[in-house]
Image: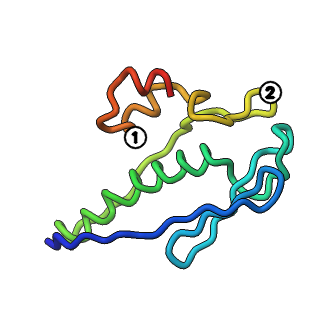
Amino acid sequence: MSTATRTAQVSVTYLAGEEHVVALRDHLVPTDRPQLDGGADVGPGPVELLVGSMAACTATTPVSRTRTQRPHGEVRDVMTGDVATVTPEKPVCHARDLPARHLHGAAGGLGQTCVEHA
C-alpha cells in the first residue's frame, strides 16, 4: 500500500454577483446561489458542493478499497438517500441549514459543539 502524500492546489476566484469558480487541479467548478437567494444558479452552492463532495468521498472509498484489497470483489451499491431536502421555500444556503447529524461525520475532530453550531 502506498504511503505517498499528495497535495493539490485549490483556488477560488470571484466572477460576479454570487458566482465564483473553484480551480482544483485541471478542473474548474462554478459555484453560485439559487435565483431565490440572489444568485444566477449557474452552479451548485458552496454547501451543495460540500455535501456532494462528502457523498462522493463516501461513495468512492468502498469502491477503491474493494479494488485494492479484494481485486475479485464487486461493489453493487454504495449509498442512496437524501442528505437534505431543498425546496424554494427551504433552500440550503449555509452549513447551519443542514441537520447536525449529517455534518457530524464530516466534522471529524471538531467535536459535537462545533457541529451543533455549524
Q: Position of residue 29 (x, y in %)?
A: 64, 65
82 sits to left or right of 106: right
- Which type of secondary structure does the marked residue at label 1 adopt? helix
Counting other residues with Cα less than 10 Å from the Cα at mark 1, is it few (<14), some (14-19), or many (20 or more)? Answer: some
- For the point 45% across and 33% down, the residue is 103
Residue identified by numbered label 1: 106
Mark 2 and mark 1 lie on one chain; the one further toward the N terminus is 2
Counting other residues with Cα less than 10 Å from the Cα at mark 2, is it few (<14), some (14-19), or many (20 or more)? Answer: few
68 sits to left or right of 80: left
- Indicate the amino acid at tag 2: Glu
Q: Position of residue 94 (x, y in %)?
A: 63, 35
In the picture, residue 27 is in which quadrant? bottom right
- Extreme residue in the bottom direction: 26
Vertically, is 84 above or below 4? above
70 sits to left or right of 44: left
- For the point 80% across and 27% down, the residue is 89
- Indicate the amino acid at tag 1: Ala
- Which type of secondary structure does the marked residue at label 2 adopt? loop
Q: Nearer the viewer, mark 2 or mark 1?
A: 1
Q: Which mark is residue 25?
A: none
Q: Position of residue 82 (x, y in %)?
A: 56, 38
Q: Position of residue 6 (x, y in %)?
A: 31, 71
Alpha-carbon distance for marks 2 and 1?
Answer: 26 Å
In the picture, residue 74 is in which quadrant? bottom left
In the picture, residue 1 is in which quadrant? bottom left
Vertically, is 75 above or below 28? above
Q: Which mark is residue 89?
A: 2
Q: Foreground residue, 47 or 60?
A: 47
